[in-house]
Every structure is written in C-alpha cells, then in structure tokens.
Amino acid sequence: MQNATQNPAPRQRPLPPVSGTCRWPQPVGYDPDPPDVGMVEINGRRYTLGVAANYFLLLAVEPDRQGKKGCYHLPRDLSSCECGDHVFRADRREDGRCKHQKSLAKLLVDGIRRMVREAA
Ligand SMILES: [Zn+2]
C-alpha cells in the first residue's frame, strides 16, 4: 500500500546555479547609429544589447538549434528576465537567476562599456 505522506520529496529537484562565460565583443556605441547598442557574448553566443532608459534588450544574433532568435527584456536592476529558464526554473535555483541576468550583472559591474569617441 502506498503512503502519500511518506516520501515528501520536492516536486522539482533543485538546480545548480548557472555558470559560464561572458564578454563584450563590442562596446555600446560601436556603431554610431543607433548609439545605444552594443554586443555581448554569453556562453559563446552573441547578443545585440540595447540599452534603454528602463531596461536592457538582449537579441540573439544567431538562431538557436530550434531556429529561434531569443529576445529578452531585462529591467535595469536585472531583477527578472523573459527567458524560459528564468520564467519556469528560477524558483529551483538558490540564486534564482538565469544566465542573462548573471552575465549582464557581471558585464555591467563597472557600468556600461561605451565606445569612447574623439570629438570631431
Ligand atoms: Zn534569461
């Protein structure tokens, strides 16, 4: 006979925090038009980074294996992300953060990297 209360295992296993690499292949403003766009690389994948007043926009440069180009808005405080990993699995991670949140936090630790232009 089964006893439903005997094995109170969590419905979903916890997941380890995400890890990986990130860098700035291009600073924000590398192309003067539009000026608030840079490029970041997260785990070898490149994203166009748009910097708006209230949010960041990450847009995958190349489609993934399913042929989708990820496009995610993150608030400036990086408290959330629109990706499936964050939406569906954040509560299974101790830090509750996806690779986009963690990578941007790391890349932005010294502020937004911007192209420095000489005055004409
Ligand atoms: Zn994300």
Image: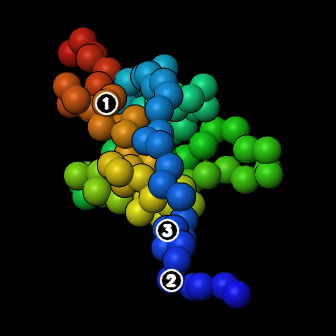
Identity of the residue drawn at 79% across and 50% down: 67
| Vertical order, 44 against 85 (above or below) | above
Which amino acid, by three-letter code, is at mark 1?
Lys
Dot 2 or dot 1: first in sequence order is: 2
Amino acid on which disc 2 is placed: Thr
Q: Quick one: 61 or 8, which is closer to the camera?
A: 8
Residue 111 position within the rendered picture, expressed as x and y whole percent measured from the top left? 21, 30
Task: Answer above or below: position of 12 versus 111.
Answer: below
What residue does disc 1 label?
106
**Residue 107 percent coordinates (x, y):** 33, 29
In the image, taking residue 70 as reference, residue 41 lies left or right, namely left
Residue that carries the numbered disc 3 in the rendered image:
10
Marks 2/3: CA–CA distance: 12 Å
Q: In which quarter of the image is the N terminus?
A: bottom right
What residue is shown at x 55% (from left), y 47% (from top)? 59
Gap in angstroms between the C-alphas marked 2 and 1: 43 Å
Q: Name the residue under label 2.
A: 5
Q: With 9 as the anchor, is 109 left or right in this view?
A: left
Which residue is rendered at x = 38% and y = 24% of the image? 27
Q: Which of marks 2 and 3 is in front?
A: 2
Mark 2 or mark 3: which comes first in sequence? 2
Mark 1 Cα shell of 10 Å, populated few (<14), some (14-19), many (≥20) = some
